[in-house]
Image (cartoon, rainbow, N blue to C red):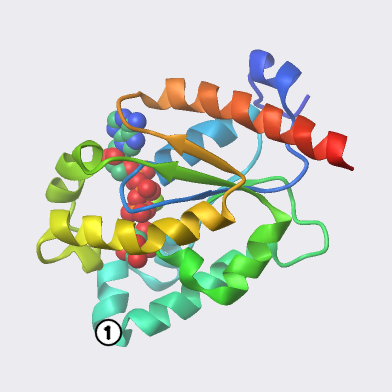
Amino acid sequence: MAAGKEPGAAQRFTPHRPIVMIGPMAVGKSVIGAELARVLGVEFIDSDHKIVAKHGPIPRIFDARGEHHFRQLEARAIADVLDSQQPKPVVLSLGGGAVLDSGTQQLLARATVVFLNADVETVRERILRNTGRPLLATDPVATWQRLAGVRGPVYARLANITLDVSNSNVPQLVARLIDLLEAESRKENSAQ
Ligand SMILES: Nc1ncnc2c1ncn2[C@@H]1O[C@H](COP(=O)(O)OP(=O)(O)OP(=O)(O)O)[C@@H](O)[C@H]1O
Ligand SMILES: O=C(O)C1=C[C@@H](O)[C@@H](O)[C@H](O)C1
Ligand SMILES: [Mg+2]
């Protein structure tokens, strides 16, 4: 059993490839991803956190170098984790717009991809109180809805698993997600 793994989850599911969390801003990719990694006893990596640790706050990167430069840093941070013949079975949470990069889309074939989806009511308070997302600087709720609508088909196409995160707390969602991951892994094994 891997160090730190919770006994119940350990018996049920051991990841053999990366698990990547995608979805719109503020749905919980970072907190759910971190908790999932803790329960499974694997490393947690967050592409936004990696960029901030190396290059400073995201709004400052957008201001100083523009969104295109941020997207390049983001694609590189993700490739560092996924671009190997056999990437490690980590949990990787992406920023909301990371899936728009075609290289990232290709690398996601090496992972089990989880689309966290939510209605606007679930995220309303979160995006109104948090000012660290430059793309939501003006009219955050309407902008969130527009981006979630445009990106929704991309998330859905890339996902192996879709989880509605509205109206549930993080431990409940992680427990449900482990059930779905286990079922997905059984399906993949029987297809081999
Ligand atoms: N199921 C939940 N119940 C209550 N609060 C939640 C839940 N999921 C996330 N949150 C809270 O919502 C906020 C946003 O969550 P988080 O940062 O994980 O979102 P994200 O999808 O990673 O967003 P981003 O796209 O900006 O990276 C945090 O304050 C987090 O604690
Ligand atoms: O949805 C987006 O495009 C973004 C989401 C955040 O996680 C950050 O990656 C950044 O603010 C851009
Ligand atoms: Mg996040």
Q: Quick check: 65 left or right of 99?
A: left
Give the residue at x 15% y 58%. Answer: 142
All told, the count of numbered labels is: 1
Visible in this render: residue 167? yes
In this figure, which residue is indicated by the disc labeled 1?
64
Residue 45 coordinates in the image, percent (x, y): 55, 51
Label 1: few (<14), some or many (≥20) within 10 Å?
few
Q: Quick check: 55 left or right of 182?
A: left
Residue 134 coordinates in the image, percent (x, y): 23, 67
Q: Quick check: 90 left or right of 157?
A: right
31 to 57, vertically: above or below: above
Give the residue at x 54% y 72%. Answer: 75
**Secondary structure state at the residue bearing disc 1:** helix
Q: Quadrant of residue 55?
A: bottom left
Query: Which amino acid type corresponds to the residue marked 1 in the rendered image?
Result: Ala
Residue 166 coordinates in the image, percent (x, y): 32, 31
Mark 1 CB lies closer than 8 A to ligand 2: no
Image quarter for ligand 1 equals top left
**In the orientation shown, which residue stands out farthest toward the right?**
192
**In the orientation shown, which residue stands out farthest toward the left?**
139
Residue 30 coordinates in the image, percent (x, y): 43, 45
Visible in this render: residue 132? no
34 to 76, vertically: above or below: above
Q: Quadrant of residue 183?
A: top right
Give the residue at x 83% y 63%. Answer: 85
Q: Quick check: 117 left or right of 19?
A: left
Question: Quadrant of the image for the N terminus?
Answer: top right
Give the residue at x 29% y 62%. Answer: 147
Question: Quadrant of the image for the C terminus?
Answer: top right
Of residues 20 and 131, the one nearer the viewer is 20
Of residues 96 and 184, the one nearer the viewer is 184
